[in-house]
Image (spheres, coloured by chain):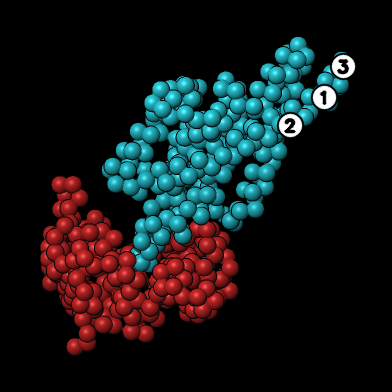
């Protein structure tokens, strides 16, 4: 069987894997966003209790390997009667792990907007929550795109650890193909190409979004001023 | 005498072990223009921020329009709607165009319809001479233009009193004039104003009352004519001496 024939015949399986990989990444990034953004604001604008919660969360999840976290969730929690399917365990672990990094990315963006605009918003009569939603967050979302896109790229690659709990994502599909065709190098190279294409397309999309949302002369530097 | 807009009573504020304000009393009446003068680091800006509670005083009371803002039950956001503040560093909202900077408070705080708010914002920008810059973002404006947008943003809320915190200190010298001109016009139109400033010429010409602060207390207080031409205290004389060049 030539490489070309293999490539063609591997397409259905690898596309299935790609879809799962993309789904997992999207769900995990969303979980990370929903948990990470509030905790980032809690870190900057919250009281002592919220700041500490945010800090401890981010340290614990960033300072332990994601694989350990995954195994705790998938193999450890069932001992307490909490059982997740591989897909749910994977998304939950990757999402909560990603949240810890997203806290740091968003915190940086929030700090670079600076406190002056917050004061101006409060002086206009906005509550702190309203000022965050109307004034700070729209700027933070723009400023965070370049660093956040790194997180999205890492996420695509990190989903491959879920092969270890048998989520049928790209790496798992690769393993299955190798078991069938015994062509390790061809399969892994092909899978690498899939990852490369996915992430290449994503990078282009992010830079388009960044350009589309850009506000003249609003950069991290000018936000500091 | 006209209506009292603002009254501060025995305001104290500490930062750590440093007492920045040591018991300040101040009363401002409608259409009065009060300038707060004094060396840097004597609590002028802190006092100004106590008026709208951006800085919460440790002790004392702040009355605005008869309402005690230091009362814990008061809705401070609602109270701040009626006080405009202009900052040294402009603090324009970087993601909004000039006109949206002016309109955002009307829409998000006062609940005005977007179209009506934009109409009003246009009017306010016209008043500060910037109707042609409405669609530019803060980053595209000069310092003087930014500060005029900031003034328009505060005025759009129809404030009872305007608080200016060194509004020209971050500006290049050639841009100071356009901002002072807007402020002077505002004073002539009867706006109640409290200004922290180092522009002695402006203070002398526009203010009804000059307040000289040092070390967290009011050292001297009087009409600009008295204060600038015959200061009563040595400290005020020394301070004014440093600004002689501004008057030449």
Determine the residue positioned at 41% across, 59% down: A131
Q: Mark 1 — residue?
A: A9
Query: Element type at marker 3?
Result: loop
Residue A126 x %, y %: 38, 64
Residue B236 x %, y %: 18, 66
- Number of the front mark, 1 or 3: 1
Which quadrant of the figure has residue B136? bottom right
Q: Mark 2 — residue?
A: A15
C-beta proximity under 8 Å, tags 1 and 3: no
Residue A173 x %, y %: 69, 23
Query: Element type at marker 2?
Result: helix
Which quadrant of the figure has residue A79? top left
Look at the picture and state if B102 lies above or below A170: below
Q: Which chain is red?
A: B
Is residue A90 at all visible to an observer of this figure? no
Q: Is residue B185 left or right of residue B1?
A: right
* Tally of numbered tags: 3
Determine the residue positioned at 23% across, 78% down: B65
Q: CA distance from mark 2 to mark 3?
A: 20 Å
Q: Which chain is cyan?
A: A
The chain carrying label 1 is A
Q: Is residue B203 left or right of residue B232?
A: right
Q: Mark 3 — residue?
A: A2
């Amino acid at each position: 069987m030539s490489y070309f024939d293999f490539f063609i015949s591997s397409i259905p399986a690898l596309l299935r894997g790609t879809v799962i990989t993309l789904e997992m990444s999207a769900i995990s990034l969303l979980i990370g966003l929903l948990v990470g953004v509030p905790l980032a604001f809690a870190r900057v604008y919250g009281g002592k209790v919220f700041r500490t919660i945010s800090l401890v969360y981010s340290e614990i999840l960033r300072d332990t390997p994601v694989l350990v976290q995954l195994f705790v969730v998938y193999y450890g929690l069932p001992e307490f009667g909490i059982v997740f399917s591989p897909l749910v365990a994977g998304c939950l672990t990757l999402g909560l792990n990603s949240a810890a990094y997203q806290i740091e990315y968003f915190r940086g963006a929030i700090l670079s907007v600076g406190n002056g605009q917050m004061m101006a918003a409060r002086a206009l009569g906005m509550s702190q929550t309203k000022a965050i939603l109307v004034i700070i967050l729209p700027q933070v979302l723009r400023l965070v795109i370049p660093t956040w896109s790194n997180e999205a790229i890492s996420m695509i690659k990190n989903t491959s650890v879920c092969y270890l709990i048998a989520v049928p994502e790209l790496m798992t599909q690769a393993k299955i193909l190798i078991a069938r065709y015994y062509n390790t190098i061809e399969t892994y190279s092909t899978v690498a190409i899939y990852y490369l294409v996915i992430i290449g397309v994503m990078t282009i999309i992010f830079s388009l979004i960044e350009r589309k949302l850009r506000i003249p002369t609003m950069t991290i530097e000018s936000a500091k001023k | 005498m006209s209506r009292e807009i603002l009254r501060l009573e025995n305001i104290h504020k500490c930062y750590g072990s440093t007492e920045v304000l040591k018991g300040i009393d101040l009363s401002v009446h409608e259409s009065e223009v009060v300038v707060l003068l004094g060396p840097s680091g004597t609590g002028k800006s802190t006092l100004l921020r106590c008026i709208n509670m951006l800085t919460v005083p440790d002790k004392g009371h702040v009355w605005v329009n008869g309402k005690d803002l230091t009362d814990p039950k008061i809705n401070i956001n609602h109270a701040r709607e009626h006080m405009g503040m202009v900052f040294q560093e402009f603090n324009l909202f970087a993601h909004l165009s000039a006109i949206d900077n002016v309109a955002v408070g009307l829409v998000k705080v006062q609940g005005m319809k977007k179209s009506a708010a934009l109409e009003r914002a246009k009017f306010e920008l016209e008043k500060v001479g910037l109707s042609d810059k409405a669609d530019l973002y803060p980053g595209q404006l000069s310092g003087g233009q930014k500060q005029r947008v900031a003034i328009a943003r505060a005025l759009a809320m129809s404030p009872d009193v305007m608080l200016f915190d060194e509004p020209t200190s971050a500006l290049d010298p050639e841009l100071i004039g356009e901002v002072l001109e807007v402020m002077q016009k505002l004073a002539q139109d009867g706006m109640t104003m409290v200004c922290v400033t180092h522009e002695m010429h402006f203070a002398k010409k526009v203010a009804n009352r000059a307040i000289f602060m040092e070390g967290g207390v009011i050292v001297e207080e009087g009409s600009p004519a008295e204060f600038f031409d015959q200061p009563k205290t040595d400290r005020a004389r020394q301070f004014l001496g440093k600004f002689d060049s501004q008057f030449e």
